[in-house]
Amino acid sequence: MPLSEHEQRLLDEMERSLYQNDADFVAKVGGARVRPTYRAVVLGILLAVIGVGVLLTGVFIQQIIVGVLGFVLMLAGVLLAITPSRAKRAAAAAGEPSQNQQPAKPAEPGFMDKLNERWDKRQEGDH
């Protein structure tokens, strides 16, 4: 059952409003994504593995303080692995591209955009 012209206009207006609001939301929240460095990830994983070993050692020798120390090492390793460096965060806040960032690619239509285009073509073909 096709939509009436009034319903189609309302739907188009809602869609435009949604795209406008999403663009505003992304601009406010998105910002530059800063990834941790390779070195930080490797050191973080290594520290987490050492922490697991210390934790298991603490359980084996039944020393709570050693187990807690192992847990703290694991937590520090994970945080090190997932947190970007201060230099990268400062560069992203200033709007400067970092050394590892690639130039921005032209925006390609996303999955939903392609589906919407196909739907619009299909609807135009029915009339």
Image: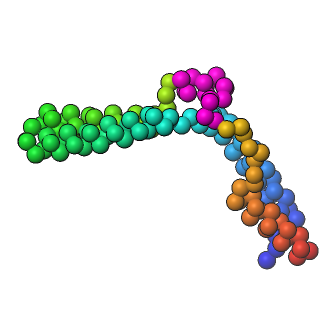
* Image quadrant assignment for residue 52: top left
Residue at the spot 67% in from the left edge and 38% down from the top edge: 102
Query: Residue 90's quadrant in the figure?
Result: top right
Q: x, y (%) of residue 92?
A: 61, 28
Residue 32 at what x, y percent from top left? 62, 34
Q: Quadrant of the N terminus?
A: bottom right
Q: Which residues are magenta?
A: 87-101
Would you say 20 lies left or right of 57 here? Answer: right
Residue 116: % across, % down: 77, 62
Residue 97: in magenta span: yes
Compare residues 99 and 55 and report the one nearer the observer: 99
Residue 100 vertical placement versus 122 (above, below): above
Depth check: 126 or 105 in front? 105
Give the quadrant of the C terminus.
bottom right
Q: Position of residue 51 (x, y in %)?
A: 26, 39
Q: Report whether residue 78 is seen.
A: no
Q: Residue at x 9, y 37 (%)?
A: 63
**Left or right: 55 in relation to 10:** left
Reply above or below: 76 against 8. above
Closer to the camera in the image, 16 or 40: 40
Count of numbered labels shown in the rendering:
0
Q: Is residue 41 visible?
A: yes
Relative to 38, 30 lies left or right: right
Q: Which of the colour schemes (rainbow, by chain, secondary structure, one colour) is used?
A: rainbow
Residue at screen point 15% across, 35% down: 66
Assess whether residue 92 is covered by the magenta stretch. Answer: yes
> At x 62% / y 29%, what residue is drawn?
98
